Amino acid sequence: MQVSLRPLLKTSLVHFTGESSRAHICHRYPHLCPLPACRMPGQNAVLLLCCLCSLGRANWLQNISTDLFRSQGDILLGGLFPINELTSNLSQREEPDDIQCNRINSLGLALSLVMKFSVDTINADSSVLPGVSLGFETYDTCQQPAVIMKPTLLFLSEGSTEEVAVQCNYTDYATRAVAVIGPLTSEMSSVVGKLLGFFLMPQISYGSTSDKFSDKQLYPSFMRTVPTDKWQVAAMVELLKRFQWNWVAVVASEDEYGRQGQRQFSALASKEGICVAYEGLIPIYSDPVHTIRDILQSVTETKVGVVVLFSLAQPAAMFFQEVILQNMTSVWVGSTAWALHNDVATLPGINTVGTILAFADMSHPLGQLKPYFQALFSQIQRQPSPNGSLDIPSMDNPCPACWHLSPDNMSLIEDSLLQRNAFSVYAAVYSVAHALHSLLGCNATTCPQQSRYDIYPWQLLEVLKNVSFDINGTHFEFDDDGNPSMGYDLLVWTWETSQVEFREIGSFIRNLSINSTLIDWHTNSDEVPESTCSAECQTGEVRRVKGFHSCCYDCIPCEAGTFQNLTDDIQCTQCPKGKWSTDRSDSCVYPTYTYLTWDSYESLGLILAGVVVLVCEVAVGVLFLRHRGTPVVDAAGGALCGLSLLCLIGCSASLVLFLGTPGDLVCRLQLPLNAIFPTVTLSTILAISLQILCVTEFPEKISAHLHTLRGPGSWLVVLACSGVQAGLCGWFVQEAPSLTRFRSDLEVNFVTRFLSCPVTPLISFGIALGFPGVLALVSFMCTFMALKPAGQYNMARDITISTLAYCVVWVIFVPIYTGLDAKNKSIAHVSVTLTSHMGLVAAYFFPKCHLLLKRPELNTADHFRAYLEGAITPPQEQPAQ
């Protein structure tokens, strides 16, 4: 992470250089030259007074060494910090000579000074390492492998010889430094991590977050004081899920940090149902402008509303420069590497890019940091200027211009990013100090093993893995992978003033907590922006993926018999046996059955019709009973006529079996009763029809046998027909399943169904139901051509019309019945039965009732002689006019 030191050091250069030296500095370091500015007399005196006050509060600050990058001590620590930035053109490098890094990186410089602060604080605290002093050597990494290798090899040199010995066994090898603090980035840690791991020298990074360093086989001595990217990626995914963003782009810097973060994010996002619409890498070793433009064009084409930027600060700054130029707005989710960096936050127009949500290491302010730097800068200010011209940075002196530092440069440590990263450096140094405290057997007053040469790096590493202590109000320890017990703060960038402000809106420690009401969204309505490839499917719809992304899909409704099992289902699930579902269902249910309840409109209508028919039948029966023995009743069948009326009444009454809850017994009686009763009635009519046929066709021969035909013969016909119908009904009952069995064997492909008695097998049901119709048809054929007796009652007419009406009603019923559902079949069956009964009553019995009530004078034996005695007189011809 690198930022320019220009705004931080320019004031001090004005105060502490003469004109000639100033001209030289401006020539060699133009970025450090200030613009002309006014200053008030006595300002230095006021600042110096403040420093003296601070020194009075902490006596140990009076003797701070002004050597910023090294100090002597019994035990030496190494430090790797990006103090400068690259100024050489590596593309033209042909020899392994020095690489020029002549542009100061203010963040790296400040972090290196935090290491000095940490060591001085430990040495001033007699309870940490009593009687033992820590020393340190800090070197510049320049963020370049060729630069960082030199100080790393120096730390590995034997003792103070500056020579690395080649040995078979390094167990008793005493290195120059016992531990290395740094480097900042994952890219640099991967360069030196395996080398330090070979010597098992503790390496404690304050900024390398790549999760690959958790692999202790590859990096056995690597530890860190910042969370791994594994947790940062988890935090980002939780953030996207919280706002239901499942269509995102991931852009990363083309380095170890960016590539690893991008891979981890894409893998975890895929597991959590978040689709990465586009992935892009920002080059860091070549001009990235053209690539960034291609990335932004792809982001626009994929129509994503959220972009995750996993990048170092400089690539992120160049990326946002193009975003500003193209006037793009989006939700930008930032990683810790650039979340608070000035290179990005100070870009002109950065407030126009949309909403920036970024993660940053949890803040743990160091209370003594500011007084320490005030005292340090004051001592540097009081020192005389060195003679000669200002040298360029070197390995031994990475910041020659730092002798210009003064209390005016306190902004160096007031940067938001430094305030958060300072604790990481501080914790790294203190973890080594506490490990040394345990290794040396220290107590509150002394350390028995004070010899520096009794300590080897591998010994320190074993103790360091188990170190646990409280620091600055925070408990600190490493897990088995060398990762710290720390989390993140979630920030949103706001521009309430002319400068960016970082507002904390949540945190992440294994779980994300967030107060979304603190976010000012860039949308016009200040609502949460949407970033989805497809609209959310409704209940009962599954996702059919289209294209290559699981988040792009069509919503397909589940058909009947299937259901949406889970929200993210891509196909409907078949209902289990015995259950069913309707269209667009998210569950299956056991079926429910309906029936003709007594209080339904249909039932009430059928009951009313049945009562009317039943009243008519009872009325006819009562009338015939009162006139029993009269010629009309005798000619209509006598006792058989009464039997037929009783059967009609029974059949009409038995229709109540179609109403209410059906059961096994009801279903066993329903068809037999509705088939046998009409059969008796129609077989009675058939017997009379046969009599009429014999009387009209064989008048000379029938007279002697008419008594037999009207008596035993008619009963024999009725019994025979009834016997046949009883056999047919028995066949049906035997073959038809019970209602309970019918329901258990029923294939459930419905949610609600009308429950009626089973009519299977259909052939036996049809024969049993059609047999009365056959009797009516035979009766019709026997009488429709019969001659009307002259001057007598026409009995054949009544039979012809009644049986014809009965046949017509049932013939019409058959095609209608086959096209109806179960409920309407039951209604139609009852309705047709009542109608056919009413037809028989109206056509056969009503004419006789009319004669009994209105023409009683015709109720004579002579008027019915043909049907009582067999004597028939043909109708006389009318004389011609």
Image: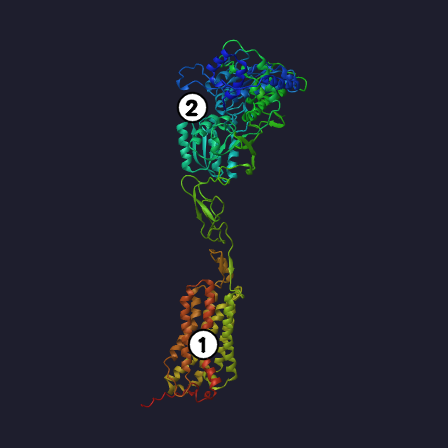
732 or 31: which is nearer to us?
Answer: 31
Number of the front mark, 1 or 2 = 2
Tell which circle, 1 or 2, labels the residue nearer the N-terminal end: 2
SS assignment at label 1: helix
Residue drawn at x 52%, y 84% as measured from the top left: 626
Residue 168's place in the image compared with 563, above or below, is: above
Task: Identify the secondary structure beneath mark 2.
Answer: loop
Say whether residue 66 is left or right of residue 879: right
Q: Pick the residue in front: 870 or 21.
A: 21
Residue that mark 2 sits on? 285
Tell me the residue that label 1 is attached to.
Answer: 840
Residue 826 image offset from top left, x and y in percent: 47, 66
* Foreground of the two, 328 or 196: 328
Residue 150: x and y, percent? Answer: 49, 16
Name the residue rendered at 46%, 63% in the picture.
Answer: 822
Q: Is residue 830 above or below residue 517?
A: below
Q: Amino acid at mark 2?
A: Tyr
Do we see residue 775 in this rendering?
no
- Quarter holding the C terminus? bottom left
Q: Nearer the viewer, residue 833 or 470?
A: 470
Q: Amino acid at mark 1?
A: Leu
Q: Is residue 436 left or right of residue 342?
A: right
Q: Residue furthest right?
A: 445
For label 2, count other residues whose C-alpha is less than 10 Å away and answer few (under 14), some (14-19) or many (20+). Answer: few
Query: What x and y, as percent, mark residue 50?
Result: 62, 19
Identify the image quadrant of residue 696. bottom left
In space, the residues marked 1 and 2 are separated at their CA atoms by: 106 Å
Residue 289 versus residue 133 in the image, above or below: below
Q: Left or right of 231: which side holds 91?
A: left
Can residue 837 be seen here?
Answer: yes
